[in-house]
Amino acid sequence: MSPLLRARHYLSPKFKQLISLSNPTLKFNFSTINNVGEDTIPANPPPIRVGTTESAGRGVFATRRIESAELIHTAKPVISHPLLSKIDSVCYLCLRRLNPNDSHIRVEPFCSQECQQQAKAFYELEKKADWSTYHNYCRTLGLKYPLLVKRLACMVIAGAASTDCISILQPAHILPEIEVEYTMLRDALEEMNMVKKSLEFLSEQWYADVLARIRINAFRIEMVAGSYDDIHTMAAASVEAEAGVGNAVYILPSFYNHDCDPNVHIIWMDNVHARLKSLRDIEEGEELRICYIDASMDHDARQNVLLGGFGFKCSCHRCLSGD
């Protein structure tokens, strides 16, 4: 059964109305990973459904009791991109750290032939362009989301993604000025002298729409060293700057709402494939929530970060108690 057909099993009726088998938006949105080591995804759909909440729009709910530390589901990203500081030390596609001892035999920035094959079409396109101006602009201003827009644009041109593949995601309401970065992206692609028709989609409005969704749905990828044995320890572990390797956008994980005291944790073991595991027992019908930010921050800091970065005032039980 295709990922899309499996996805329809755990969408609520209202969400099923938003999709159809011919809808390109869901070309690969609900992909999950099978055979990921000690945690193997069953052939049946995950024990969740996507529905609507009273206060936060869409959300993810348990369809049965979920045990503490249970692997709920995994997810492959729609888009991923390394941090510019790590662009030569991690896999171009899955962000797995490359073995520096193999640098003398490695021709392309991939960890495996599988990743190289999956990314071949848009990688060949992307490496032909001169991104120095675009990258320097992002590096100077500390921007990361335009890199994901760049990657998606190349994927669309190469036929590896549809122009509206993330349109189901909620957008940010306010965006900074994007004319300069959009022009840089457009110029870099036009200088390749490709067929004009292949760039018809790349308007400033498309750029703004995609960036608006990436801005509040992208995850910073932090690799966790260790095993699944103690999920609570991993959730509480401090995040070091060196742990960050890139950013990625997913569909199903983006449907999870925020809570400063979450019952689900999203982790990355050694690549960009996301694992969502329960932090405690979750009852059937209960909403599954993750924490969007550093939960160790105090109440005021959390409120400021969530309001400024995600556009909402948090009213979870922890925040309402003043903790």
Image (cartoon, helix red, strand yellow):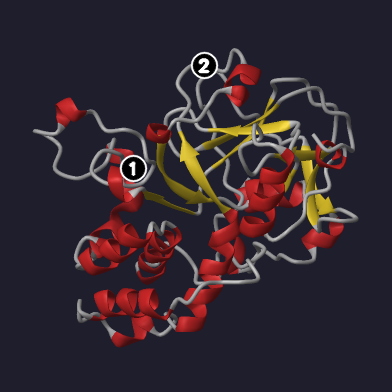
Q: Position of residue 276 (x, y in %)?
A: 63, 33
Q: Under tag 2, what secondary structure?
A: loop
Question: Is 83 placed left or right of 222 in the picture?
Answer: left
- Identify the residue under disc 1: 115
10 Å neighbourhood of mark 1: few (<14), some, or many (≥20)?
some
- Identify the residue under disc 2: 227
Where is residue 320, by image quadrant? top right
Mark 2 or 1: in front is: 2
- Residue 221 appearing in the image: yes
- Label of residue 97 in the image: none
Q: Position of residue 143 (x, y in %)?
A: 41, 59
Q: Position of residue 252 (x, y in %)?
A: 65, 49
Residue at point 48% right, 17% down? 226
Query: Which quadrant would the C terminus be assigned to in this image?
Result: top right
Residue at point 23% right, 68% down? 133
Disc 1 marks a residue whose amino acid type is: Cys
Where is residue 68, by image quadrant? top right
* Spatial CA span between label 2 and label 1: 23 Å
Disc 2 marks a residue whose amino acid type is: Ser
- Residue 45 appearing in the image: no
Residue at point 28% right, 36% down? 111
Residue furthest left in the image:
104
- 59 over 39 or under it: above or below: below
Where is residue 270, by image quadrant? top left
Question: Is 261 placed left or right of 320 in the picture?
Answer: left
